[in-house]
Amino acid sequence: MPKERGEKVVATNRKARHDYLIEDTFEAGMVLSGTEVKSLRMGRASLVDGYAFVEGNEIWLDAVHIPEYFQGSWNNHSARRKRKLLLHRQEINKIAHKVAPGGYTIIPLKIYFNNGNAKVEIAIAKGKKEYDKRHALRERQDTREAARAMATRNRLGE
């Protein structure tokens, strides 16, 4: 079977950019079992409640739901287990230094396959306040209305 090329997105955390202010992003590998990889290849995963944390000199991904592989046997994985993330030591130190004082959290943004290898994009993020969320929604709505008005005006002007 030929090796996969390119990037295939399995799951994205669309609400993360609404709920958090993203400071920095990292690409990390994941330590997975065979049935987890098969389940991901079928496009089944959820990042809704997922988060990562630093424990010692390692970063762990927790509460990410990768459902059991339906053709798996007694050797199937549990759906919400902790999964170790694979990063360079400098990246782990940078993340740990940023998160340690408090106020920041590590969240997964997307799970994807890059040239056949399962990867997760994690971000160092700070939670937004409710008024920040409303302000962002209002800005987005205003730019959409302005673009719509310009398109209508350009169409009538021709």
Image (cartoon, grey):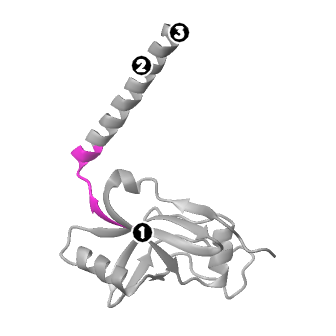
Q: Which residue is mark 3?
A: 158
Q: Nearer the viewer, residue 88 or 130?
A: 88
Does residue 31 appear in the picture of this structure? yes
Report the residue that reaches farthest toward the bottom.
Answer: 56
Q: Which residue is mark 2?
A: 149
Nearer to us of marks 3 and 1 is 3
Report the residue that reaches farthest toward the right.
Answer: 1
| Structural crowding at the residue carrying mark 3, measured as other residues with C-alpha within 10 Å and reported as few (<14), some (14–19) or many (≥20) | few
Name which of mark 2 and mark 1 comes first in the sequence.
Answer: 1
| Structural crowding at the residue carrying mark 2, measured as other residues with C-alpha within 10 Å and reported as few (<14), some (14–19) or many (≥20) | few
Amino acid at pointer 2: Ala
| Structural crowding at the residue carrying mark 1, measured as other residues with C-alpha within 10 Å and reported as few (<14), some (14–19) or many (≥20) | many
Q: Is residue 76 left or right of residue 23?
A: right
**For numbered disc 1, what is the local secondary structure?**
strand
Amino acid at pointer 1: Ile
Q: Which residue is mark 1?
A: 122
Q: Nearer the viewer, residue 80 or 95?
A: 95
- In 3D space, how far apart are the residues under numbered discs 3 and 1 (Cα atoms)? 47 Å
- In 3D space, how far apart are the residues under numbered discs 2 and 3 (Cα atoms)? 15 Å
Does residue 68 appear in the picture of this structure? no
